[in-house]
């Protein structure tokens, strides 16, 4: 679900930890006629050779002074406007905040924290401690200095007893004293100590390799305590300092917000890397169905994303360059197997859940003709996923995993053996007790092709005798979808979405017992053990951790609580008035360095 996805106009510092924070929907669907039962034709000759998509572009011409970067935020719903890294839960808000990020760390091409950011990280693995030190004199966009109080305050927000966000999880509980503070037994987090105005020390219950990618409870953003501390934590999400006038550390600062529609930023003269070369950034919502035409007419210089199934509409445009890279994300099909207990802050697995039959789930996976959908509608920009680890994480992704290939005959055999049989001869299988059996699917409405691809998969399932109906009888608007999925709405048996993983490959933030993002609600002692192994002290050994990742991937395949659907190639259209632009992980053009060779976007 999530999303997303990630941000293609910012540095890797900005996408650090975005994973555990963002849900994205897989919005690209087919353009097959609604209700068609025909198998889409293969279009191998029309596939994009993704290896030829460049990481960077340089446009010749004299640089002009200033200018406004016009960005299209591709969304079919209004953004929520929660501009706080600690509180937001919407990928669109995250993409907007990327222009004014409060990120402390910068990561390299292997997604490991470097010393090139606002702060540096020193790890004392032997004593389970880390030191975070502010480098140089850094100021907020209002001119106030960044201090260690601003580094500590986010932890106090997330750990607070009144915090209702999703980031207080098993990872956060790794901080010594976090649980006592959250339960109201202590007035501060004992494991976080202010050494001086530049340095804090954090004591952890364990230190694993995840710490070097922002895991183990490490929080990668600062929060302006001088602006926030007078507001109760429970009131922050609705406050003006979050909704209307947040101050930031990023290259740009908020200037004008039109709720749900657009945000204008102006250059931050206090930015620690220097004032940006352009004057403004305007981020404006654009529907997915309109973005191709908007790029053609020069309305936008960049877009937050571009959907693979619309590639044909821009591939021959002369006013843009198309860059590409492997996304830190995957699309998936999830099954509802329990509930989330907000009071306890943990997922509760229900052995009596309707979809708690591993054979049923595997049959559903084998019945999906994902290969044909990716070939025809995504032109090679999406491929069938075999794992819940994106290939960009080369040390941990295992390409030898088989995954679930399209095999309807195998799906039928599994269902027969499991006891799901068509007892009344209508072509639809009953449940094991001979009762009518309907599965309710939640999926997101987006582009004008979303319904057709979902209908194609519904036909796949019907072909093996399964009746799959849409939750509420139609595709769901983005925010409504997430409201229902997060609330474990009883109308949902399974759901389609996507995760943006961020730069930390550890799956604990998505699949652990205490992870609010574990939307399937599947938990087990074995799963907990496997997740703990990935982020254990023993996993400081690279080979041990690689094997731990492999074991977890195999387990998730066997239990089939989450079915990986697509790996994604991110395509990034760049208007040719931008002087230089690069997107390779570890070598991304930073926003303060964006320059133009023309006053307006080239048409």
Image: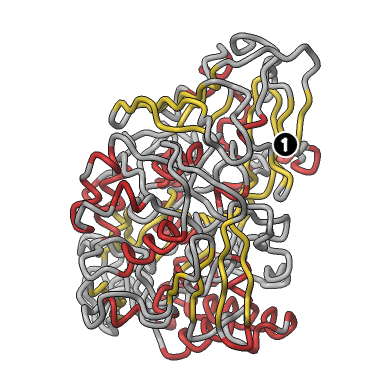
Identify the residue at horizontal 24%, vertical 51% (top origin): 236
Total numbered labels: 1
- Residue 233 lies in quadrant: bottom left
For the N terminus, the quadrant is: bottom left
Q: Residue 418 vs residue 588: left or right? A: left
Q: Is residue 443 visible?
A: no
Q: Which residue is mark 1?
A: 582
Quadrant placement of the C terminus: top right
Closer to the camera, 308 or 394?
A: 394
Kindly give the residue lying farthest to the front in the view shown: 196
The quadrant where residue 259 appears: top left
The x, y position of residue 186, in whole percent, is: 26, 80
Q: Is residue 515 above or below residue 276?
A: below
- Viewer-proximal residue, 33 or 98? 98
Q: Is residue 333 above or below residue 596?
A: below
Say whether residue 380 is visible. yes
Callout 1 crowding tier (Cα within 10 Å): few <14, some 14–19, many ≥20: many
Q: Give 125 or 526, whichever is nearer the viewer.
A: 125
Q: Position of residue 103 (x, y in %)?
A: 52, 51
Does 39 sit left or right of 321 as displayed? Answer: left
Q: Residue at x 46, y 85 (%)?
A: 528
Please provide percent x and percent y for residue 411.
Answer: 49, 70
Instruction: Name which residue lies at 52% across and 71% down.
Output: 507
Secondary structure beneath disc 1? strand
Residue 575: horizontal and vertical position, in percent? Answer: 65, 20
Q: Determine the image quadrant of residue 463.
A: bottom left
């Amino acid at each position: 679900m999530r999303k997303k996805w990630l941000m293609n106009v910012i540095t890797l510092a900005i996408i650090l930890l975005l994973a555990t924070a963002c849900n994205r929907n897989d919005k690209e669907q087919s353009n097959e006629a609604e209700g068609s039962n025909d198998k889409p034709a293969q279009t191998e000759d029309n596939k994009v050779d993704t290896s030829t998509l460049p990481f960077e572009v340089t446009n010749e011409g004299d640089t002009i002074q200033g200018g406004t970067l016009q960005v299209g935020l591709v969304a079919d719903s209004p953004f929520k406007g929660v501009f706080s890294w600690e509180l937001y839960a919407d990928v669109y808000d995250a993409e907007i905040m990327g222009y004014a990020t409060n990120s402390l760390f910068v990561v390299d091409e292997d997604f490991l924290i470097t010393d090139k950011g606002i702060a540096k990280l020193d790890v004392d693995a032997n004593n389970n401690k880390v030191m975070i030190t502010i480098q140089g004199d850094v100021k907020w966009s209002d001119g106030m200095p960044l201090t260690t109080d601003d580094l500590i305050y986010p932890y106090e927000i997330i750990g607070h007893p009144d915090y209702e966000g999703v980031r207080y999880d098993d990872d956060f509980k790794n901080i010594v004293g976090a649980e006592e503070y959250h339960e109201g037994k202590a007035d501060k987090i004992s494991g976080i100590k202010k050494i001086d105005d530049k340095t804090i020390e954090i004591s952890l219950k364990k230190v694993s390799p995840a710490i070097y990618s922002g895991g183990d409870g490490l929080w990668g953003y600062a929060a302006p305590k001088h602006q926030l501390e007078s507001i109760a934590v429970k009131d922050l999400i609705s406050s003006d300092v979050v909704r209307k006038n947040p101050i930031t550390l990023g290259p740009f600062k908020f200037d004008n917000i039109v709720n749900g529609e657009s945000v204008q930023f102006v250059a931050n003269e206090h930015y620690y890397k220097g004032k940006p070369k352009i004057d403004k950034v305007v981020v404006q919502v654009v529907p997915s169905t309109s973005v191709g035409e908007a790029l053609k007419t020069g309305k936008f210089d960049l877009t937050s994303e571009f959907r693979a199934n619309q590639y044909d509409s821009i591939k021959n445009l002369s006013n843009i360059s198309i860059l590409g890279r492997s996304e830190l994300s995957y699309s998936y099909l999830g099954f509802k197997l329990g509930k989330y207990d907000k009071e306890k802050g943990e997922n509760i697995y229900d052995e009596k859940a309707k979809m708690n039959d591993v054979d049923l789930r595997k049959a559903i996976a084998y019945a999906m003709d994902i290969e044909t959908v990716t070939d025809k509608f995504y032109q090679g920009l999406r491929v069938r996923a075999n794992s819940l680890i994106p290939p960009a994480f080369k040390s941990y992704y295992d390409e030898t995993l088989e995954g679930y290939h399209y095999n309807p005959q195998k799906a039928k055999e599994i269902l027969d053996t499991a006891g799901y049989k068509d007892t009344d001869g209508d072509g639809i299988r009953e449940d094991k007790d001979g009762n009518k059996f309907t599965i309710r699917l939640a999926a997101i409405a987006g582009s004008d092709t979303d319904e057709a691809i979902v209908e194609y998969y519904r036909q796949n399932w019907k072909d093996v005798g399964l009746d799959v109906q849409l939750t509420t009888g139609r595709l769901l608007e983005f925010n409504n979808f997430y409201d229902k999925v997060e609330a474990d709405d009883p109308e949902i048996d399974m759901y389609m979405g996507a995760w943006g993983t961020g730069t930390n490959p550890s799956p604990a933030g998505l699949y652990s017992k205490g992870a609010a993002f574990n939307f399937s609600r599947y938990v087990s002692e074995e799963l907990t053990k496997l997740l703990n192994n990935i982020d254990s002290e023993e996993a400081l050994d690279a080979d041990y951790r690689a094997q731990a990742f492999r074991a977890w991937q195999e387990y998730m395949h066997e239990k089939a609580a989450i079915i990986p659907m697509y790996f994604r190639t991110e395509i990034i259209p760049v208007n040719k008035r931008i002087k230089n632009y690069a997107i390779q992980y570890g070598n991304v053009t930073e926003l303060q360095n964006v320059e133009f060779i023309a006053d307006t976007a080239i048409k």
